[in-house]
Amino acid sequence: MEELETNMIKKIYDSETGCCKRFNPRPWENKTIRFNNTMFLKDRVRSFFHIPLNFGKVMGRNMEKITEANALAKVPICLSDENSLWGADIYIAVSKKIENSKIVKIPGVFLSKVFEGPFKNIGKWIKDMQEYVASKGKQTKKLYFFYTTCPVCAKVYGKNYIVLLAKIE
């Protein structure tokens, strides 16, 4: 994790690590979630076969904008749309519009499911998520990934939680 990102987050969230808060999976496990008026700052991360190359830099830049605008969301959410082998759109929840930033809404109804373990399991988790959505008689229209902690904090906490959100409406 890059120093800028670490220092910026330390100033923002009070946590055991001084970085990411400890994640509580209960509110996200097997839930139906509605995003209606939730605003997200949208940006893009470069990747190589879905491995992010500049995630820390992008997050640091955006967290600086968000804190300067006093636009922190009550619940920190950063969604990733892994829409290419070469990059991903990221969506960081914000409480208000921020000048010179692309602010979007992702309206819809989502089914969420929490997974825990190493990133190498992502293919299995996607399959499990598709089966979960089908078991509810629904179809996935779009899939988002909510990486709940950075790799450093995941190691400290001993848990690497990832929430998959399947847009169904």
Image: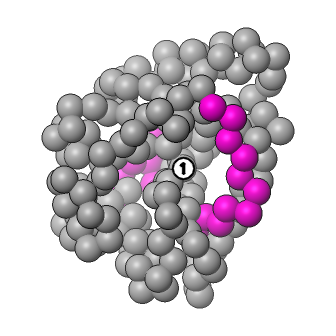
Q: Position of residue 112 (x, y in %)?
A: 60, 32
Question: What predominant SS class does the magenta segment belong to?
Answer: strand
Left/right placement of residue 115 relative to residue 129 reads: left
Left/right placement of residue 151 relative to residue 91 reads: left
* Residue at position x 33%, y 24% in the image: 117
Q: Position of residue 52 (x, y in %)?
A: 39, 48
Please tell me whether residue 135 is drawn above or below residue 161 in the rendered image.
Answer: above
Residue type at numbered disc 1: Leu
Q: Nearer the viewer, residue 37 or 122?
A: 37
Please tell me whether residue 147 is drawn above or below residue 168 in the rendered image.
Answer: below
SS class, disc 1: strand
* Residue at position x 18%, y 54% in the image: 17
- Is residue 6 shown to the viewer in this render? yes
Please tell me whether residue 142 is drawn above or below residue 58 in the rendered image.
Answer: above
Label 1: which residue? 79
Q: Nearer the viewer, residue 7 or 33?
A: 33
Task: Find the magenta span and give its range.
Answer: 31-54
Where is residue 151, by image quadrant?
top left
Q: Position of residue 39 (x, y in %)?
A: 65, 66
